[in-house]
């Protein structure tokens, strides 16, 4: 059973990655914040008494469901008002992109980067982030859970509500697509 302190620490640890994941899907900062907040409230209210080890998988599933609910509401709203929503991504407000922290460096490196190296690294990170956003939704979801959230195949399958084989297929295709797109841009990781 998770204590209030453990639950609070878990939510604090996951909030930035959850926001980025929601933002990838909905491409609207305010909606992404609402989705993450709703997910956190649902986890706290319905599953706050679960063991701490179960919280990551439960939260990922709740976040996925809240994101799908948002899309359903958008679809209904669009049908009622018969107009398309604007899904254009907003600019980057300088937020960290945790998925790529290891590539970007953690800030306490012994060597000092030149301005050119730093700019090149930032441009590479932006290219990678853009390519991740362009992945099909299920591939992006599987990729982010497996390689960003560091969930294993079984946990990812449970969170996504699909088979382990589907998770492996989605991840393989995502990696293939990202590799080809980045190679075409001259980016070697």
Image (cartoon, rainbow, N blue to C red):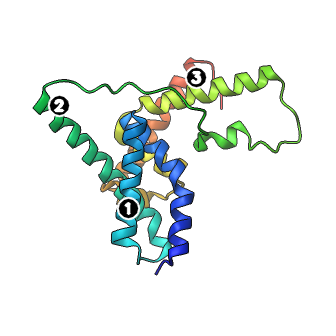
Q: Name the residue under label 2.
A: 78
Q: Distance between the residues labelled 1 and 3?
A: 41 Å
* Residue 87 in sight here: yes
Q: Is mark 1 on a helix, strand or loop?
A: helix
Q: Which residue lies furthest to the bottom in this view?
A: 1
Instruction: Measuring from the top left, give residue 94's x and y in whole percent.
Output: 61, 33
**Secondary structure category for the residue under label 2:** helix
Q: What number is the disc on residue 67? A: none
**How many numbered markers are drawn?**
3
N-term-proximal mark, 1 vs 3: 1
Of all residues shown, which one is farthest toward the left? 80
Q: Which residue is drawn at 11% across and 33% down?
A: 80
Residue, disc 3: 183
Q: Reply above or below: 150 against 76.
A: below
The residue tagged with tag 3: helix, strand or loop?
Answer: helix
Residue 41 bears which disc, if any?
A: 1
10 Å neighbourhood of mark 3: few (<14), some, or many (≥20)? Answer: few
Report if the CB atoms under discs 3 and 2 are less than 8 Å apart: no
Give the residue drawn at x 58%, y 43%: 99
> x, y percentage for residue 177?
46, 30
Q: Where is residue 162 in the image (x, y as percent from the top left)?
A: 30, 54
Mark 3 or 2: the one toward you: 2
Does label 2 or label 1 sit earlier along the sequence? 1
- Evaluate whether residue 164 shows in this view: no
Q: In which quarter of the image is residue 186?
A: top right
């Amino acid at each position: 059973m998770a204590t209030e302190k453990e639950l609070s620490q878990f939510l604090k640890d996951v909030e930035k990655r959850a926001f980025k994941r929601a933002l990838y899907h909905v491409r609207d900062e305010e909606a992404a914040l609402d989705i993450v907040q709703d997910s956190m409230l649902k986890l706290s209210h319905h599953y706050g008494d679960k063991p701490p080890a179960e919280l990551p998988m439960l939260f990922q599933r709740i976040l996925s469901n809240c994101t799908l609910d948002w899309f359903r509401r958008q679809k209904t709203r669009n049908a009622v008002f018969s107009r398309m929503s604007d899904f254009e991504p907003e600019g980057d407000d300088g937020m960290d992109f945790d998925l790529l922290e290891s590539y970007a460096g953690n800030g306490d490196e012994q060597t000092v980067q030149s301005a050119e190296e730093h700019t090149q690294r930032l441009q590479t990170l932006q290219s990678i982030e853009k390519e991740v956003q362009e992945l099909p939704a299920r591939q992006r979801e599987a990729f982010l859970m497996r390689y960003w959230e560091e969930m294993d195949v079984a946990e990812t399958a449970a969170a996504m509500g699909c088979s382990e084989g589907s998770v492996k297929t989605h991840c393989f295709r995502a990696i293939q697509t990202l590799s080809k797109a980045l190679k075409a841009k001259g980016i070697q990781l």
